[in-house]
Image (tube, grey):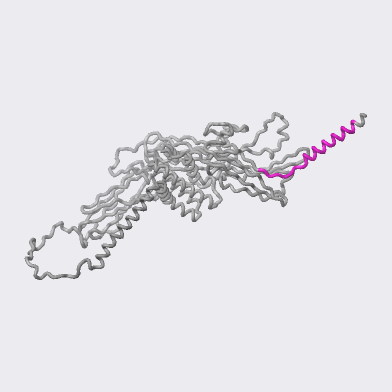
Amino acid sequence: MKVFSNLVLRKIYTTLFLILFVSCCSFAQSFTASSSGSKVGLSEQFQVTFTFSGEEINGMKSFKAPNFKDFMPLSGPNQSTNMTIINGAVSASRSFTYILQPRQLGKFTIGSATVDYKGKTFQSNPIHIEVVKGGAQQSQQGGGAKGKNPKSDNVSQKEIGENLFIRASADRQQVLKGEQINVTYKLYTRLNIASLQVSKLPSYPGFWAEENEIIQNINFTNETVNGKQYKVATLKKVALFPTETGQLSVTPFELKIPVYVQKKSRSNNPFDDFFNDPFSNRPEVVDYTAISNTIKVNVQGLPQSNASSSFTGAVGDFSMKVEVDKKSVKTNEPIKLKIKISGTGNIKLITLPEFDIPAGFEKYDPKTSDDLTHGAKIGGSKTAEYLLIPRFAGKKEIPPVKFTFYNTAKRQYQTITSEGFTIDVAQGEGGSGSSGGEVQMLNDDIQYIKTNAGDIKENGSFAFESFWFWLLCIIPLAGFIWLLIFRKREDKLSSNMQLLRYQKAQKMAKKRLKTAGKYLASKNEEKFYAELSNALFGYLENKLGIAKAEFTLENALEELKNRNVPDELVEALMTTARKCEFIRFAPSNGDENPMQSMYDESVRIIIDIEKSLA
């Protein structure tokens, strides 16, 4: 009886062992998709992972991602491979991870990815994502307040901050009003990071700002800071010219940076580290907001002593060229006088010098233009072209033009004086003036008046018999009829105010984005996004009445909210403007479709703002 029970127990153990062995050794291939959350905020990033797993993955090839048409890929595919050995049985998996950001609000489906394995095609499951307004992803991860960094169980924010930060530096912090300051923003990291996203641009109240080097791509170099080796990249270089005195501040630059951190073992078993396979620790992504330091600058006023009356606020090092296009003219013929200021300094803030004109000349408002050059020092030229018209004959003297600026290298005021010009004005036909200013009298001041009409006779035909008479009668009549038709159309259009506003807004949007449309047609991505950004910012400056030196995106968004523009439209404007301004942080593959969608979205935003503010 005992022998029988032992045989039964042996069979049971053998069966259980075979079942366990087969289950451990047989791993069917699978291909699945997962996301870090099913509900995300419009301005948030989230992670999508496609994982192929099985007993061996060497035969896997030809991974094809789905179309992320409703999302903007910021990073990926980032590949990782995991292997596990249990009782001699090997299982493995390979993952393809993307970091995405939504383009608009709504519910969307990310389609299936495909992969080939030994002649068989595997297809992943689709993923459903709901994009909502606000910070949905942050609330899902722990209900943190808006603007706070999400926490991770594996790494603290302090640890990340010690190894990842932005440093803003200025080449000087004690300057005179109008003197150039160079500010540089650098990213320091010892961590594995993904594509950057701008959270908040720095603002420069009290300064005229101009980028002195436009950085298209981020390139890292090695640098040692306090004995630690960092990868360092220059994010932004800007030249600032103070327009006010006192202590001025440059607000911080904020970046939202996805950081890859290795998962830490939560077990206290000392043997876990021995058996831990480094390939099995898949990194997780933690969003970290890096904030630069605030720069304070002490600005002093220019010295008042030795300041000439011709000083107009120019600070730097300049030269001046004054010329006229001709020195011999007839009365009522125009003369062009051109003043060109060239050099380095606050070119855009310069007021061109005034000059006197001879008696009998008329001077019209000038046509001005700026031509800037970027580099270590901002320079270029400012040109004004005046139209002068002499009304009387004679030799006329245009006195020399004086231009005074404060030379920052010599620390003193410097005055440049041009040559004067002698203009020989001859009497033209039909002129109203004369060389001596005298009025010539008629030979006879009283003419004889005829008292009879004996020699008067008919000269030609009656006026109404002329072709021109009838033509001149028909033209006003036709014009009146056209005016009635036009007026009727305008009245009909005015009755539909919504259509009228839409047409006006559409016309303004197309005018603003005309140049960007040309770059879109030529597929010039760099100039397209730059022009698109300029069009949006220029539109907001003009529409909201914000001075260029005081304009920031945050100020514009706040002003739109104060004018009761819908939050959805403000959110869309913020997202589009930041994508345009910082497309270099996530360069695309040159595809035309994202450019076209950005262009269409910008047109829509300007039209909707026009309708909201009408």
In the rendered image, residue 80, in percent from the top left (x then y), is placed at: 66, 43
Answer above or below: position of 594 versus 175.
Answer: below
Considering depth in this image, is 141 or 82 the residue closer to the camera? 141
Q: Main secondary structure of the magenta part?
A: helix
Q: Quick check: 203 left or right of 103?
A: left
Considering depth in this image, is 18 or 483 the residue closer to the camera? 483
Q: Is residue 8 magenta?
A: yes
Answer above or below: position of 135 versus 536.
Answer: above
Residue 181 appears in view: yes
Residue 189 appears in view: no
Residue 462, quarter of the rendered image:
bottom left
Considering depth in this image, is 59 or 301 the residue closer to the camera? 59
Q: What's drawn in magenta, residue-wise?
A: 5-32
In the rendered image, residue 474, in percent from the top left (x then y), is placed at: 28, 62
Answer above or below: position of 427 versus 404.
Answer: below
Residue 230, quarter of the rendered image:
top right
Please name the residue shown 31% across and 43% down the image.
311
Please name the residue shown 60% across and 45% down the image.
110
Q: Is residue 265 magenta?
A: no
In the rendered image, residue 526, in percent from the top left (x then y), is placed at: 49, 50
Answer above or below: position of 414 versus 266.
Answer: below
